[in-house]
Every structure is written in C-alpha cells, then in structure tokens.
C-alpha cells in the first residue's frame, strides 16, 4: 500500500508493478486531489536513466511526454565570489595515468611550470556545456572523454506519465484523504481510514505522503534529525517562465545574497526558483529577487514552498518505509531528491519480505536504514561543501555557513584534499570523486601537495600527454551538435525547438 501520489509515490508504484509478481503482491496507491503534490523537482541525476531502463521506458517517448531536455551537469555562478563560475559535470576530468588520478598530474604540471589549461578544459562534458552542445555518449569513447547525462523535465508531466504507466500495469489508484492510520497491538500499521469513511487494510506500507509524513513521522514517530544549522535555506519560490534562446544542456545555479536561484531549461518553458534562508531575507524580497532575474515573462504566479534540511532517523520502521519527502529533505542544489527516491525504492525491493514469510526481517530493514543513512550523509556533506568554500564575506548567510563547525565526515574529506589532493572514493552511492573535484577546484580550493606517485612520469612525457588529452577532449566536444538540434531530432520537431535550433 502506497500513501501519496507525488513523484515518490508513482515512481514507487511503477517500480513495484515492474518487479513484483501480480499474483503475490496487490498494489494500491492512495492520493488526495485536495492536497496535491509539491509539483517541483525538474532536474535529475544520470541514475534516472537506470530507473527508466528498469521500467523499459522508451527515451524519446518519455522526453516528449515530459517536455524533457538533456543535462550534462550544473553550472554554478557566483558561488565562490560574484563573477566566478564553474561546471560540475557528469563526467571525468582526464584519466588515470600510471594508476594515479588526473588531478595529481595536473597539480604537478602547475607546480612545475608547464602551464596546463584550466582543469575544466580536460572535461568533455564541461566543454560541451560551454558550447550548448550535446551528443549521446559513445560506448567506444576513450576513458579520457567519458561523460554521462541526465534529464530536466516537467515534474507534473512526469508524475502523470508514471501514473499512466503504473495503472496500466495493475496498480489500483484510490482518490481520497487519509484521516486515520490504524495500528496492530505489535505497533505495525494495519490500515487506513479515508475521509469518505472507506477503510483500507494492508500488510506493508510505503509512506510517500510528502512533508506530512503521515505514517512514518506522525504515526510511527520516527525521529527527525535536523540539519538546518549546516544547511539553513528553508524556503523557495518557484515559477516557470517563457523559454529563452539560451537552451542549455545544464542546470544553472546562481548564488544570491541569501540563497541561490535555479534555472532549468525545458522544451516548452524554463523552470526557475529561489531557494533562500528565511532568517536572512523576507519572503517578499526573495520573490522580487527571483522575478527580477527571469529570462522571459513569468507564466504563473510564484509558488512558495517551505522545508527543513534533515531526515528521519529510521526511514524503514516496522512495516513502513518512508520514500521521498516523507523520509527526508536536502535542498535541490545537486538535484538529489529523485535520486534518493530511486535508491530507496530499489533498496526496498531488495529487502522487502516475501508475503509468505509473514513479517519483517529486522536485519534487512536495518541494512536498508544503514544504506539510506550513508547516502543522506554523503550528499549532505557534498551540499555543505558548496556553501563553506566561499569568499562572500560580509553577507550574513555566507558568513554563517563559513563559521559553523562542519560534520566530522566533511572535515576529514577537506583535510585529506588540502594536504595531498585526495578525495575518498565510495564504491556505492554518490557523489563520485570527479564530482568532488569539480566543486573543490571550482570553489577555488587547491591542495598543498599532490600524490608523489605522479612523479614517476617524466616531465616531458607529462607535458606531451596533457597536450594530446586537451586536444582530444576539444575535438570530441567540438564535433557535438547543438543541444536543441539533438532534442529536435530525438523527440520530434516542435516549433519551440526549431526556433532554439536556429538561434
Ligand atoms: C523547492 C524544491 C525544489 C526541488 N527541486 C528538485 C529537483 O530539481 N530535483 C529533484 O530531484 N528533486 C527536487 N525536489 C524534490 C522533489 O520535488 C520531491 O522529492 C519529489 O517531488 C517527491 O515528492 P513526494 O512525492 O515525496 O511528495 P509530494 O509531491 O508532496 O506528494 C505527496 C503526496 O501525498 C499525498 N498526501 C499527502 N497527505 C495525504 C493524505 N492525508 N491523504 C492522502 N494523500 C495524501 C498528496 O496528495 C500527494 O499526492 C525539490 C523540492 C523542493 C521543495
């Protein structure tokens, strides 16, 4: 039984319908038209393509129906200092040489006076972003030019798309407002009561009720761990505007005095939002800041959303798993919410009890929670990194985030990088080493020393290798067609796209 029909609820319903045998599992989703969804969540990570593959969704159809565009990364403007910018790409910077990571060779080249190009010029994805170009990664692409891609899409259209997909495959949808949640003596949830008086029973429950967290938070009292001292932004204004000619294959994130603004290009419009810390700016000022920076006329009234950074201590408690906003929230700086939803769904399916076993195996739910905790904490640290490494002195939000003691786990990563240019590598989960490097170098942090194993390459050889790599990346990215052209070809011509392809 799934409570909630936002992106979390319908992603979960679709994946369950795909993986669980209909003769053994009956799937029901309850959602309330009166309550509605948050209706934002337009930028994704490359892992979403795995989710589409799981569902066997045709990419072109999916992109047409959700008005999607391609995303090669995020451009951060003004984060370190007004006027500075960098891209966090979904791809590598250079490649391993002699088993040593590229950043060490690049640092060595700098320190030895070889005058290498800026780090970002060794990333194919960044160079494509700079040209507003896109192409599908080729399996035969050399490691040095590796990149992946994700999507931007219309969140409302995406939820509708998944709803059609899931209900066509046997998920029963009930419209109604849950007003009571019943428990057995054991404490497990046994059923729901709707406003209409209807009672629905179930064995296993997914709480996808959004920030309300009706089952996991309200009923089962899974404790909330607050992270607002590290991530103080707690509100956002969101508004769509007319599409501009600047049809970028990347999300743009522009730092502001008391937060940051997102800009997400879709086929039919541009999504915009101002994420801000309400203790440093009023709602009215934040709204005006957003409206003053739109590319084109607004297409709707701005919508105000309130949130807190943090997570539920136990995302799986008893016979209930919280997915999406019901289990936690991290601001959309790196587009991680849909990714967290996807990971939670996949892990839930991994550890879900078989109906005939008649109960939860607590070792499996504990493993789910351990993985969920690790993922949340790594993403949290990565987001904090964007804030702490700044030189925006004299601006209260930025002074606050710089001065606050960091989580131990982040302090460790920063010290490791500062002393020898290393970034911890995780086999599972996000973010990758190249992502950390993009933000660390992008925010102007430089290590004091590099890995001395890089010294095994003769310096002339290093110089030649860097030149060849630089040229190879430039050629590869230089041959890509424009983003607008690829979408028009892939998804079918539309008037908006034809205009973008010409401009
Ligand atoms: C400002 C902002 C920007 C974001 N941007 C991104 C982004 O770029 N990328 C990204 O990945 N994520 C982003 N997110 C997060 C993303 O929007 C959410 O993670 C995603 O939409 C999932 O939401 P949800 O389904 O958990 O909750 P919701 O969308 O709130 O859905 C909750 C559902 O529960 C139902 N419900 C609630 N109470 C009841 C009840 N009593 N009875 C019956 N039904 C009930 C509602 O009807 C609704 O269907 C953003 C979030 C915010 C706030």
Image: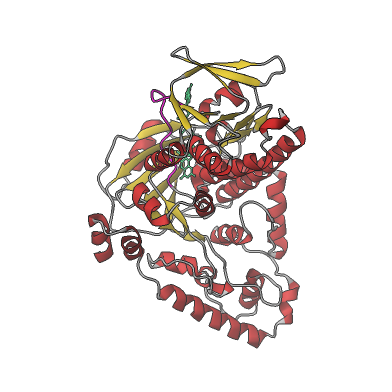
**Residue drawn at (49%, 81%), measured in percent from left and top?**
471
Q: Quadrant of residue 175?
A: top left
Q: Residue furthest right?
A: 363
Residue in view at x 28 percent, y 51 percent: 243
In terms of secondary structure, what is the magenta stretch mainly?
loop
Percent x, y of residue 304: 39, 32
Foreground residue among 14 and 498: 14
- Give coordinates of residue 365: x percent, y percent: 71, 35
Judge whether 200 appears above or below 245 on screen: above
Q: Is residue 276 left or right of residue 460?
A: left
Residue 76 visible? The answer is no
Residue ID at (69%, 37%):
369
Please tell me whether residue 275 is drawn above or below residue 251 in the rendered image.
above
The quadrant in which the N terminus is found is: top right
The x, y position of residue 2, in whole percent, is: 53, 30
Tally of numbered tags: 0
Q: Is residue 351 left or right of residue 265?
A: right
Please give left or right for residue 319 compared with residue 340 in the image: right
Q: Is residue 36 visible?
A: yes
41 part of magenta stretch: yes
User: Magenta segment, which residues?
Assistant: 31-42
Q: Between residues 101 and 343, which one lies in front from this camera angle?
A: 343
- Extreme residue in the bottom direction: 460
């Amino acid at each position: 039984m799934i409570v909630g029909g936002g992106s979390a609820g319908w992603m979960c319903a679709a994946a369950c319908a795909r993986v669980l045998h209909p003769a053994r599992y009956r799937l029901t989703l309850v959602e309330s038209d009166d309550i509605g969804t948050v209706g934002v969540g337009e930028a994704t990570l490359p892992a979403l393509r795995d989710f589409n593959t799981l569902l066997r969704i045709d990419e072109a159809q999916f992109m047409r129906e959700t008005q999607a565009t391609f995303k090669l990364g995020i451009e951060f403007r003004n984060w370190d200092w007004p006027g500075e910018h960098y891209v966090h790409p979904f791809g590598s910077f250079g490649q391993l040489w002699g088993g040593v990571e590229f950043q060490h060779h690049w640092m060595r080249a700098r320190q030895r006076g070889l005058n290498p190009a800026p780090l970002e010029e060794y990333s194919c994805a960044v160079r494509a972003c700079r040209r507003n170009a896109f192409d599908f990664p080729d399996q035969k692409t050399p490691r040095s030019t590796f990149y992946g891609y994700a999507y931007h899409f219309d969140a409302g259209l995406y939820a509708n798309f998944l709803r059609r997909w899931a209900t066509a495959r046997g998920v029963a949808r009930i419209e109604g407002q849950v007003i009571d949640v019943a428990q057995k003596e054991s404490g497990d949830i046994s059923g729901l009561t709707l406003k209409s008086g209807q009672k629905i029973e179930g064995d296993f429950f997914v709480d996808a009720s959004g920030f309300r967290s009706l089952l996991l938070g309200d009923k089962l009292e899974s404790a909330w761990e607050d992270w607002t001292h590290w991530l103080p932004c707690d509100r956002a204004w969101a508004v769509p505007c007319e599409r501009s000619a600047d049809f970028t294959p990347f999300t743009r994130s522009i730092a502001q005095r008391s937060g940051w603004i997102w800009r997400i290009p879709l086929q039919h419009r541009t999504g915009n939002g101002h994420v801000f810390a309400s203790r440093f700016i009023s709602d009215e000022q934040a709204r005006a800041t957003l409206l003053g920076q739109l590319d084109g006329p607004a297409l709707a009234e701005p919508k105000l959303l309130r949130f807190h950074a943090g997570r539920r201590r136990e995302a799986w408690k008893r016979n209930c798993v919280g997915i999406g906003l019901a289990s936690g929230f991290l601001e959309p700086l790196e587009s991680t919410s849909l990714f967290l939803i996807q990971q939670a769904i996949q892990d839930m399916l991994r550890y879900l009890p078989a109906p005939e076993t008649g109960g939860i195996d607590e070792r499996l739910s504990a493993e789910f929670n351990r993985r969920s905790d690790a993922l949340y904490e790594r993403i949290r640290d990565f987001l904090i990194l964007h804030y702490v490494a700044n030189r925006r002195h004299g601006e209260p939000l930025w002074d606050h985030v710089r001065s606050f003691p960091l989580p131990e786990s982040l302090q460790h990563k920063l010290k490791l990088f500062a002393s020898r240019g290393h970034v911890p590598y995780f086999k599972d989960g996000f973010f990758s080493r190249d992502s950390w490097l993009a933000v660390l170098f992008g925010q102007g942090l430089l290590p004091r020393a590099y890995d001395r194993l890089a010294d095994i390459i003769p310096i002339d050889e290093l110089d030649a290798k860097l030149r060849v790599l630089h040229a190879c990346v430039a050629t590869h990215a230089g041959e890509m067609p424009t983003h607008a052209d690829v979408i028009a070809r892939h998804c079918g011509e539309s008037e908006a796209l034809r205009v973008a392809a010409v401009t």
